[in-house]
Amino acid sequence: MPAGMNDILSTFVQSLAEFLRGIPIFIVNYASVLMLVLFGAIVYIMFKMMPKTQTQVQSPESASAIGWKDVAGVDEFRKELEEVVEFIRDPARFRALGAKVPKGVMLYGPPGTGKTLLAKAVAGESGAMFYAQSASVFVEMFAGLGAARIRKLFAEARKNSPAIIFIDEMDAIGGARTGGGDGGTREKDQTLNQLLVELDGFGGDDQVVIIGATNRLETLDPALLRAGRFDRSIYVGPPDVKGRHEILLVHTKGKPLAADLDLTLVARRTPGATGADLANICNEAAIYAGRADRTEIIQKDFEAAFERVVTGIAQAKVM
């Protein structure tokens, strides 16, 4: 090292030593306390910056409550859910027969097929309170927060029973446990364990049913799907041609349609389309009519909307 650099380094070390000698001894003694205060402030700021999660709560008397009449194209899926409705309406009839109605029902299938609407309809038809939450909000960076939110949700539902708890994106917390892993994995496992505890804690008098939804049933932990927890799994797939026609009728209600518009033809041309896709097609058709400065939606508008939406679906599948 050059002699000049040695002089500079020596001068720096001497200056640093003099600076440290000038620091009051009480600051050195309480450095650990100051570090703890700083850490606490950082944690507090992180808590404040975290997004606030609000459980969607809907009473059966709410103007936005829905029933079977509001859910089109799901006749083949709703039959098993009607048993849940009957149990909540008249639990004594089932108990007198020694019957045990499922504590939980898992709805699975591709996105946009109406799983959330089905859960809302069960609550509306049974006169139950409806509590909806996405499972992703239970996955937190701080240990124990997800489990605490699960406990709070179930406690609230029990207090206001009869109630339906709907948890969407169940695979966010219900994936198969691997053991070990990083802090995030352990927090996820702890949250899942709390959910299992709550399901096991349902008593005979609890009029609370949990409905889960997932796009990937095969990834869920087997413990979640065993008898006594999510007893039933119901596949909710894209509607058939009859169901698509019913959905189109729902989403065109109140829209000015041309007299010669054939929605049956639109239904036949959209195999594999989900309820969400069909709602999008109806909206796009109205937009096309508006762009053309027409006062009615014609067949040509639906054809253009179909091409636009189907092209988007095809691109999404390729990606």
Image (tube, rainbow, N blue to C red):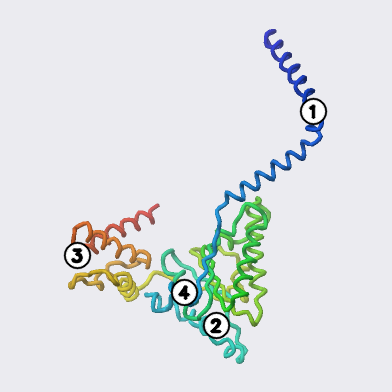
Going 59% across and 77% down the picture, which residue do you hit?
A: 161
Q: Residues within 10 Å of mark 2 (few under 14, many from 20)?
A: many
Q: How crowded is mark 1: few (under 14 residues within 10 Å), some or many (20 or more)?
A: few
Q: Earlier in the sequence, mark 1 or mark 2?
A: 1
- Residue annotated with mark 3: 295
Q: How far apart are the two marked residues, 2 and 3, measured between alpha carbons?
A: 46 Å
- Relative image position of residue 29 (x, y in whole percent): 81, 34
| Side of 270 relative to 31 (left or right) | left
- Relative image position of residue 56 (x, y in whole percent): 51, 66
Q: How far apart are the two marked residues, 1 and 2, measured between alpha carbons?
A: 71 Å
| Side of 102 relative to 306 (left or right) | right
- Residue annotated with mark 2: 88
Q: How far apart are the two marked residues, 1 and 3, measured between alpha carbons?
A: 82 Å
Q: Which amino acid does label 4 sit on?
A: Ser
- Residue annotated with mark 1: 24
Tell me the mark number nearer the camera, choosing from 1 and 2: 1
Q: Which of marks 4 and 2 is nearer the N terminus?
A: 4
Q: How far apart are the two marked residues, 1 and 4, measured between alpha carbons?
A: 66 Å
Tell me the mark number nearer the camera, choosing from 3 and 4: 4
Q: How crowded is mark 3: few (under 14 residues within 10 Å), some or many (20 or more)?
A: few
Q: Which of marks 3 and 4 is nearer the N terminus?
A: 4
Q: What residue type is labelled 3?
A: Thr
Label 3 secondary element: loop
Q: How many marks?
A: 4
Q: Looking at the rendering, which quadrant does residue 223 occupy?
A: bottom right
Going 26% across and 63% down the picture, which residue do you hit?
A: 286
Q: Earlier in the sequence, mark 1 or mark 3?
A: 1
Mark number, residue 62: 4
